Structures are given as C-alpha cells and as structure tokens.
Amino acid sequence: MSGSTAAPDQLDERLVRTSPLRKLLGRPELGSVVGAAAVFLFFAIVADSFLQASSFGTVLYAASVLGIMAAPVALLMIGGEFDLSAGVMVTSSALISSMFSYQMTANVWVGVFVSLLVTLAIGAFNGFMLTRTKLPSFIITLGTFLMLTGLNLGFTKLISGTVSTKAIGDMEGFESARVLFASTLTLGGVEFKVTILWWAALVGIATWILLRTRFGNWIFAVGGEADAARAVGVPVIRTKIGLYLGVAFAAWISGQHLLFSYDVVQSGEGVGNELTYIIAAVIGGCLITGGYGSAIGSAVGAFIFGMTSKGIVYAEWNPDWFKFFLGAMLLLATLLNAWVRKRAEATT
Amino acid sequence: MGAVLAVVLAASLAGCSSTGGKRAEERAAEAAEGRAAVNTPRWTFAMVTHSGDGDTFWDIVQKGAEQAAVKDNINFLYSHNDEANQQAQLVQTAIDKKVDGLIVSLAKPDAMKAVVAKAVKAGIPVITVNSGSAESKEFGALTHIGQDESIAGEAVGDELNSRGRKKALCVLHEQGNVGHEQRCAGAKKTFDGTLQNLYVDGTNMPDVTASIEAKLQSDKSIDAVVTLGAPFADAAVQAKKTAGSKAEIDTFDLNAKVATGLQTDKLGFAVDQQPYLQGYEAVDLLWLYRYNRNVLGGGLPVLTGPQIITKDDADALADFTKRGTR
C-alpha cells in the first residue's frame, strides 16, 4: 500500500507484521467510510422515506452515475493529475454515438463503437499533450474542456439543427444497447439500474489494478514523485496516458448510459460535473497532490454524494441549502481523512 | 468583538433609510399567508423543475405554489436541477416518497418521459408546468399550465413589427432549452425584419453583458434586443450603454427591475407568462383533482401567457414585482 520507493536495504520494515487494526487505520478510505456511516445514520433518522428499499435503489443509482467516473478520476489523481474535461467528455461521447448512428442510418452499435474510439482518442490527446508539453494538467484539460464544450454545441447545431440530437429510439440495435447501458433490474420488488453493476465492476477493476498489478505501483510512483519514478525505471509517459484512457473509457460508459436512458442528448450538459468527480475522489481519501488514495474510497465518496443529494430531498429540506451542505461535508470529510491519516502514521 | 457589534448597531440606527430596504419589503408583503381554507387531509405535493440555482422566475412560481399550498392545506415540497438526468432523479425521489401529487416542468421532455410515466403508473396525478405543452398529454399528465412558447414568440414578433423594428437579436441564456428555441423561432416567424440568435451563458452575468456588447458593437444596425429572462434585460441595458447602441431592449418575463425599466423607458416591452399563476394553479388544480376529480383545460394546455406589458401597465405592477409575486 505504501507508494514510496524507499531505500530497499531496510528489509525488516517491510517484513514486519502489522496488526489488523493498524492496517485498517492506514487505509485511505477509512475516514470516508466513517463519514458515509455518519451520513447514512443522519438521514435514516431525519428522513422517513430514506430507509425504504425503493429509495435505496434511487440513491445507489445517483451514486453509480457519479461513481463510474469517480473511480478512474481517483486513479488519475493518485497519478498526480486532473482531468477537467471529464464532465463534458461524457456528453461528447453520447453525442458522437447518437449522431453517427442517426446520420449514417447505421446500426446503433456501430455508433457506440465509433464513440468508444473517438472518446479514447480524446483521452489519449489529453495524456499526450500533458506528457509532451509538461504543462500542468489543469491547463491542458481546461483547454480540452472548453474545446469540447464548443464542439458539442457547434456540431450538434450544425448536424441536427437544434441543440439536442434527434431521437434514435426506433433504430436497429437500440434495444440491445439499452439493455447493456440503461436497463433496470428488479430485485425483490426494488428497481436497480444496470449502472450499479458497471460501477461495481469498474471499482473492482480499478482496485485490482492499483493494488495487485505493476501498473498500479507505477500509478502510485508517478503521483508521488514523477522524476524519482522515472529514475527507477517507471514508464511515466505510458502510465499517465493510460490513466487518461481510463477516464475516457468511463466517460464512454457514462455517455452511452445518458444516451440510452433517454434516446436524445442535450448538447449543453455535463459542464461542472468534472468537479463532482474530483470531490467524490477527494472525499474518498485521494490527495490533491497525488500519490495517495484508493478506488474504493472514490466509491464511498460517490455513495456519500448520492446519499446527500437525495437525502436532502427525502428529508424535505429546502434545496437552496444543498450546495452549502455539500461543501461543508467535503471539508469535514477531508479533515477527518487528514486526522485519521495523521493518527495512523503517528502510531507506526 | 462587543465594540464592533455596538458600532454596527449604532450605525444602523443612526443611518436609517426612510425608503426601500427590508422595511419597505415587509410592508409590501402584507399578510397573504394565513391558515388553510379547506379541511381536506394534509396531502403532500412535490414540484420538480429544471430551474438553476437562485433563479428569479422560479422563485415566483414557488411563491405562487406555496400560497396555494397554504390555502389548500398541502405539504408542498420543491426541488430543482438544471441537468435533465438529475431532474429525472429528483422526480424519482418524489415517487419513492409516495407523494399525493406531482408537478413537473418539461424543458427537456425526452429525459423526463420515462420517469413521468412511472409516476403516472404509480397512481400519482401529474400536472406539467411551464415548458412542455406539446408533450404533457402524451406523457399522461392531467393538464399543462404554462405559456405556449411559439405563441409567445409570435406575439413578440408582432409587437416588434408594430414598433417598426428592422433587425432584432434574440438572446438565449440556457443552452438546450427547447422552449427558448421555440420563443426565438416564433418571433422569427412573425417578425418582418431579420432576427438573429445569440447564445450566452446564463449563469455568468458579466459574460452575458460582454457577449451582447460585442454583438452590438459588431453590428450597429441591430435596433432591438430580446432577452428571454428578466435578469438578462438588465445585462442587455448595460451592454447597450457601453456599446453606444440605439437598440430597444425587450424581454420575456418580469421582475422589479424590468418594471422600473419599463417606467423609465429603458425597456420597450415585456412579455409576461405570469409565473405566479403557474405555481398557484398547479397546486390548486392538483387539489381539485384529489378533492373532486376536476380537470381544467379540456385536454388542452391552460395558458398563463403571453401578456404584453408596456409602460402603461408597469406602474400598477411595480408594487407586485417588489414583493416578488409578479
């Protein structure tokens, strides 16, 4: 779990057995799990309808839509970079598959596949520009963010004539694609969206990559100290481009979900969501400075976000205060994280 | 700390303003609130709109709805989100709560279709407000309360003609809002001159001003600017001043500033859709449906606009705009 490239001669430190409790305290997502439990208890008490099974399905859906993006964004942040274009990239991805299928009168799956290629290309562009220019990712992806926002509206108006795409619900392949990206599963009378499965799968894969593969070690290394990582032979450029491809892939899934839920896409949407992804990752224990964090944490962060955004409605509060509550929660979660980590480090 | 407080208190006492301020507002908001006028059970109605945060228009809709809720003994819940996906989720939460009635705006109808159908299936009476007159019936709503955006746009075109305008600018502040597109298209249809669309970012006021300013500077022949929301009329007035343009500023919707603008000839006319009515009637009609199975409109939308407001009407409306119900 330690991302350090510390001197290899201190073998005894690595071989020493740590107690399970200490191991638990050292996990990046611990603070957020405590926070999630607190938020859950809070809304269970103040909102009557929060504990209903159907409400749980709604909360999980809200969390999953966010969590699908938060997982790769967390990985990217552990790798020390941001992606401000992630929010609009979701909309771009949905627009591409919708408009390609419609204009070419092609099977919807063709559009979905084309969209995957183009979205991955956008991710690769982000990663390539970043590693080539060595400029901060903040600047690079801000540029991509603005360009995509413009392209989304410009192309949609140019091709469809309006600000939203044409309906593709009656086209071939739509139904099968909807099953994959936007179907609803009924479990014990409660409706669950398929995005929850996508979310679980992505978090699982991300955690496996992070903790069990060499690529995972590289991510921690480039986020901790890129130059040192390069010096010990970590392929920094490949790792970072890989991380951006991960974000693009998740954007593609989210985009297809958006499209197949409604069969029409609004070109102006997605702006501002990139910050929500980052917030979820940070609540889940990712450091803004990189080198520390976890994919499971991002899922917990997304879950907290989902519970709060819907809990406020179930509790019948005035939504005017929603953003304040969100901000306060972000601050509290981050403080809790910092405190827990400090305690954990102090005891080792 | 205590000293600071004392200074602040002293300053506010010494520097009393005899005009405006909170006191004037309190005086204007004469007790319209009060007790329930009916003894039906306390039903819960939820309203889910596509409003952004802190939107004047929707604030008035909310006021109307709250007023009716007090009279009809309704527990009224309001929530909003300007992203279609999020708005759909909010409707879902209302269904989870098993509300007794649902009020939805259909600015992005395709996104709301499935979830509104779900509410109808769950036996919740639905009334659509504001945008979505074309889709309302198809989605299974009882009725639609709002303004037909195309008709409102056409009214603007006619009014511009009667004022002898030749080249107009239609300022759209919400990208992706089909209703806004219809307004501008409607105006274009009846307007004899040329009409151009200009997209601005409605959540960023300085940007709105700058965009309109740039447009007015680059095209001096524009003699009318039509904004689609009351707050943007003020931005257009400022832009006109800095650009040194002679264009007349007209707007959709009304607020206190627009009313004074009309009185002082800064604005030409306003097209009001009476948002207060949309909130009030929606709650009241849901109550009527629950109480007596009454449905208004006969299968057609109940129109709350367009109402063209000029300098002549502005005086009477100024007080109502100040208390936030017009």
Image: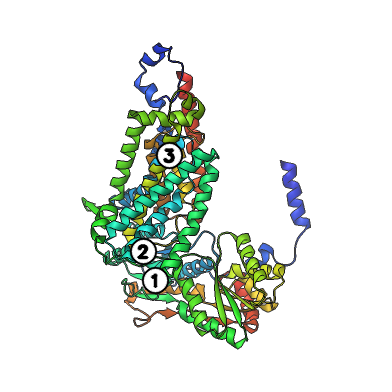
**Is residue A285 among what the camera can see?**
no
| Image spot of residue A264 (x, y percent) | 36, 64
Furthest residue toward left = A188
Q: Please give left or right for residue B287 compared with residue B223 in the image.
A: left
| Image spot of residue B143 (x, y percent) | 36, 76
- Is label 2 in a helix, a strand or a loop? loop
Q: Quadrant of the N terminus of chain B?
A: top right
- Is label 3 in a helix, a strand or a loop? helix
| Other residues around mark 3 within 10 Å, as few (<14) / some (14–19) / many (≥20) | many
* Residue type at numbered disc 1: Thr
Q: CA distance from mark 2 to mark 3?
A: 31 Å
Whether A9 is drawn above or below B154: the answer is: above
* Residue type at numbered disc 2: Val
User: Which residue is under mark 1?
Assistant: B128
Furthest residue toward right = B14
* Residue type at numbered disc 3: Ile
Question: At 44% from the left edge and 75% from the top edge, which residue is drawn?
Answer: B281
Q: Please tell me which residue lies in front, A203 or B313.
A: A203
Q: CA distance from mark 2 to mark 1?
A: 20 Å
Whether B229 is drawn above or below B310: the answer is: above
| Residue B307, numbered circle | none
Q: Quadrant of the C terminus of chain B?
A: bottom right
